[in-house]
Amino acid sequence: MPSSLPLSALLSRPPAVILGTHEVASAIAVRLRLNGRGVVLSHDPLPPVLRRGMAFHDALWGDEATIGGVRAVAVDGLLDLVAATARAHTVAITRMGLADLLPLGRFAVLVDARLHKYAATPDLRPFASSSIGVGPGFTADLDCDVAIETRPDRLGLLLTRGATEAPDGSPPLLGTHGEDRFVRAAEAGIWRTAFPIGARVFRDQVVGRLGRTAVRAPLDGILRGLVRDDSEVPEGAKLIEIDPRGRWQARWSGLDDRGRVVAEAVGEAIALLDRRASTRAAATPLPFSVRSPR
């Protein structure tokens, strides 16, 4: 293949690019890949990924990561990315950011699923035919084509105009526990832990260390979320999440329920935007006149 061809010409179908590698981004990736789209997940270091058993995130370190019958393959170059997105039941995951991926050409779909609740959001629309913003901070028809709500009382709602709701700071209950099932970083530092996701822990048990400070489990239960060992974390980042419901009810792997709902909403948003594009194309007159042969 001549090197002068754009990389997008090597793709039978332009990829969907998802910003984020956590459980919601991963659920979206599974949904789009099973629908036949090539998918690239772009890693963002903040906030640190917590529910790693429900995410493709650990594939970035060479770990096996398969969710919903779809496997993630880590890539660090555009040609490897193209090859990975062409494989069945496979998504590409990369540390390359949005700017690094621009040589692929205009994306078919761009989903910002980073869930930066309080950060300024970029205008996604110039980069993709269909741009979708997930969670707080997005305004449909201003910085994305469609925005999707993630608050529990509005989960999966599609907006084609207007802003998504601001975060309320109250996580949904898991059993009878809300915010108290999490442990947050008291200061910025390097997080160290030897525990795996899914381990049984007990209240006040030391689960890891942030710098020289021991970090303890807040409850008895199963480690549903745990930031990866040797991660640099900012102050306030969630380090630990406990599922207090017991071994037989606790969930720490597979498709996340919230992610599944958001993923279905992303699929609906893409279908809506495809219909809108088809309607617009049908209404656009040809740039030349066509005469019937005599």
Image (spheres, rainbow, N blue to C red):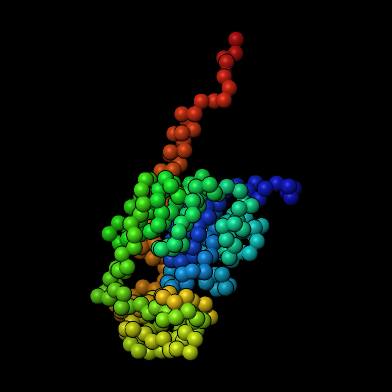
Residue 169, position as x, y percentages in the image:
32, 68
Residue lying at the far left of the rendered structure:
176
* Left or right of 236 in this view: 109: right
- Placement of 14 over or under 44, stated as above or below: above
Residue in front for this viewpoint, 185 or 43: 185
The quarter of the picture where residue 198 lies is bottom left
- Res. 124 visible in picture: yes
* Left or right of 62 in this view: 25: left
- Placement of 224 over or under 287, stated as above or below: below
Q: Which residue appears at 41% of the width and 75% of the height? A: 236
- Res. 90 visible in picture: no
Q: Which residue appears at 46% of the width and 33% of the height? A: 280
Residue 104, position as x, y percentages in the image:
62, 51
How many numbered markers are drawn? 0
Residue lying at the far top of the rendered structure:
294
Q: Locate the C terminus by quadrant.
A: top right
* Left or right of 257 in this view: 68: right
Residue 108, position as x, y percentages in the image:
53, 47
Residue 288, position as x, y percentages in the image:
58, 22
Q: Which residue appears at 48% of the width and 79% of the height? A: 188
- Placement of 237 over or under 274, stated as above or below: below
